[in-house]
Amino acid sequence: MFSNLTKRSFIMISIQFCKYHGAGNDFIVFDNRGDVYSLTDETRRHMCDRHFGIGADGIVEIKLSQSDDFKVIYYNADGKEGSLCGNGCRCALAYAKSLGIVSFAGTLGDCALENPECQGQSVYTFEASTGRHVGIIQETVKRGVNLVEYFVKFGDFLASDIKQYNAEEFYINTGSPHHVKFITNELENMNVFKAGRKLSYELYGDKGSNINFVQSTRDNQTIKVTDEHRPEAWVKAKDNNVLYVRTYERGVENETLACGTGAVAVALIQHAKDANVINMALNSQTSDASSNTERVELVRKTIEMKGGKLTVTFKAVINDQGPSVLYKDVYLSGPAQYVFRGVYEMPQD
């Protein structure tokens, strides 16, 4: 009865990959500088599947760049090419160093290191969906422990880039679109998947948006964090620079343990909200430099997410003649942890 069946032989393609995570935001990362692999959306979606594939929030592909040290192409867990991914770029830095990619960006070091948080030993430039970015790998020793932190520099932003819906809800595109909602009730028990998905598609249609829910700690208040991924039971804050954030990510269509571009969005909006400068245009053409009314604040925000802490630092250029703020030298920093390496096999079409 099986005589009419024909045997099919497949040529298998093997993809050598590494798994990395940035504060629990996890990625499949592989080297495609030789343009060896051409994957379909369905293949990438299957690779990211946590039950039938490797499992990840997204895929980071490293390619050759004609102008920079390397190029980063990011794909969401649904297999489709995504917008800028901050944690994915930081993991790409760690992977690029492991590949032995040589940086030719040493001359950019002085500019990048104007931010005192970035006393880095290695400076790279890389291409992403939003153009050229500077990446810095900082190695320090604290109490005899070697620590490595990965920084990605973002472009400049204006306070007027922020759209305000009401007193507690805002929107900004930091390379990826982000809706930010400040809440006063306990964030721990919120159904982020349900609330985030509802806001994403009701407000932003089929394209959707990332949705960030934020609870800030002030004075000596504490926010309770109970999560299987974190050993700490409580996160304490002595000032209002610590923000606890949970994010629903479009493309993943679920809550992720951290989001880099979301952390940047929250930090900028929090500052602009407190300074009451949202929707006020920056008019640098009419400012009188001789009046010496422009001042620069170095701002540092700690963003506490379910997978760990991220830090956002930036310079707020404030003009006292008007409620104008320019945000420059914006850096996202935090860990980028290697998890494991493996080989993914698939039949060639």
Image: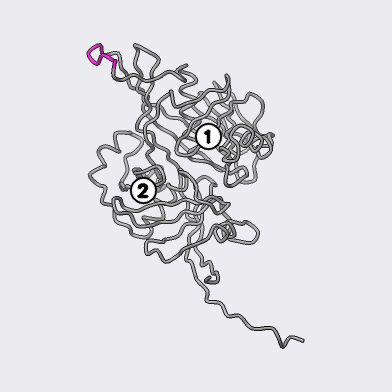
Q: Amino acid at mark 2?
A: Glu
Residue 23's label in the rendered image is none
Looking at the rendering, which quadrant does residue 196 occupy?
top right
| Tags 2 and 1 touching, CB below 8 Å | no
Q: Is residue 244 left or right of residue 31?
A: right
The residue at the point 65 percent across, 59 percent down is 51
Give the x, y percent position of residue 58: 53, 51
**Residue 84, above or below 294:** below
**Residue 288 located within the stretch drawn in magenta:** yes
The residue segment tinted magenta is 286-292
Q: Is residue 93 left or right of residue 6?
A: left
Q: Secondary structure at mark 2?
A: strand
Q: Nearer the viewer, residue 337 or 182?
A: 182
Q: Nearer the viewer, residue 243 or 135?
A: 135
Q: Alpha-carbon distance for marks 2 and 1?
A: 22 Å
Q: Amino acid at mark 1?
A: His
Residue 178's label in the rendered image is 1
First in sequence: mark 2 vs mark 1: 2
**Residue 234 located within the stretch drawn in magenta:** no
The residue at the point 54 percent across, 42 percent down is 258
Q: Secondary structure at mark 1?
A: strand
- What residue is disc 2 on? 127
Q: Nearer the viewer, residue 206 or 89?
A: 206
**Residue 303, above or below 16:** above
Looking at the rendering, which quadrant does residue 209 occupy?
top right
| Image coloring type | one colour
Give the x, y percent position of residue 49: 61, 57
**Could you classify mark 2 by the number of other residues whose Cα lies within 10 Å: few (under 14), some (14-19), or many (20 or more)?**
many
The residue at the point 29 percent across, 15 percent down is 286
